[in-house]
Amino acid sequence: MTDKQFIIRLNGLEVGSHLYEFKVTDSFFETRDYSDIQGANVKVAVELLKQNSIISLTFKLSGTLQVLCDRCVKAYDVEIDSEEKMHLRFGNPDEPHAEDVFVLPHGENELDISPPLFEFISLALPSRLVPCEEDKNFKCDFDTLNKLNDISVDEPEQKPDSPWDKLKNINFNNN
Ligand SMILES: [Zn+2]
């Protein structure tokens, strides 16, 4: 899938440094099957350094992502501030190559940065999202928790500690 607004044109690009700015908003995730992220307001600065045979890109991400608490599935904002690099060169993508180098087919004149961007955003998130453990002012939404627990009573095969499974149940029952 190609997202037109996340394309960097490679044809005619001179050797040297080039700067790009992108904005990741809610719509970036609407078209992707990634339910952990509900919304986004992230600024992405990309510095592209073109050398003779290799192109290096540095991604600087800063902003907020709206995610769901792992425990009570309440939405909250998490701040991200990260920097990631990727390298690419032209060649035959089917031939063996270094794992950290992305190979573009010869003659390809655009780079769609949305797949690596998506990966970098996912990497910037903590692996466990339970804000109530880190922030004493943030309380789990126990009303939601209780409702989820009530619904799952008749479902002995569901793991009681997984709100995600219970959510799937709700959707299933409503349909
Ligand atoms: Zn919570």
Image (tube, rainbow, N blue to C red):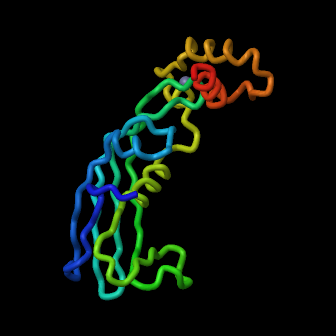
Quarter-of-image position of residue 57: bottom left
Q: How far across and how far down the image is residue 150, in percent?
A: 68, 12
Residue lying at 56% horizontally and 11% vertically, measured from the top left = 143
Position of 39 relative to 57 (above/below): above
Position of 108 relative to 76 (above/below): below
Q: How far across and how far down the image is residue 56, in percent?
A: 35, 74
Q: Is residue 170 left or right of residue 76?
A: right
Quarter-of-image position of residue 110: bottom left
Q: Nearer the viewer, residue 174 or 135?
A: 174
Q: How far across and how far down the image is residue 8, in percent?
A: 27, 66
Residue lying at 74% horizontally and 15% vertically, measured from the top left = 153
Q: How far across and how far down the image is residue 78, in percent?
A: 42, 36
Locate ligand 1 by image quadrant: top right
Q: What count of labels does the image hold?
A: 0
Residue lying at 23% horizontally and 56% vertically, measured from the top left = 21
Residue lying at 40% horizontally and 77% vertically, measured from the top left = 104
Position of 157 relative to 43 (above/below): above
In the picture, the quarter occupied by the N terminus is bottom left
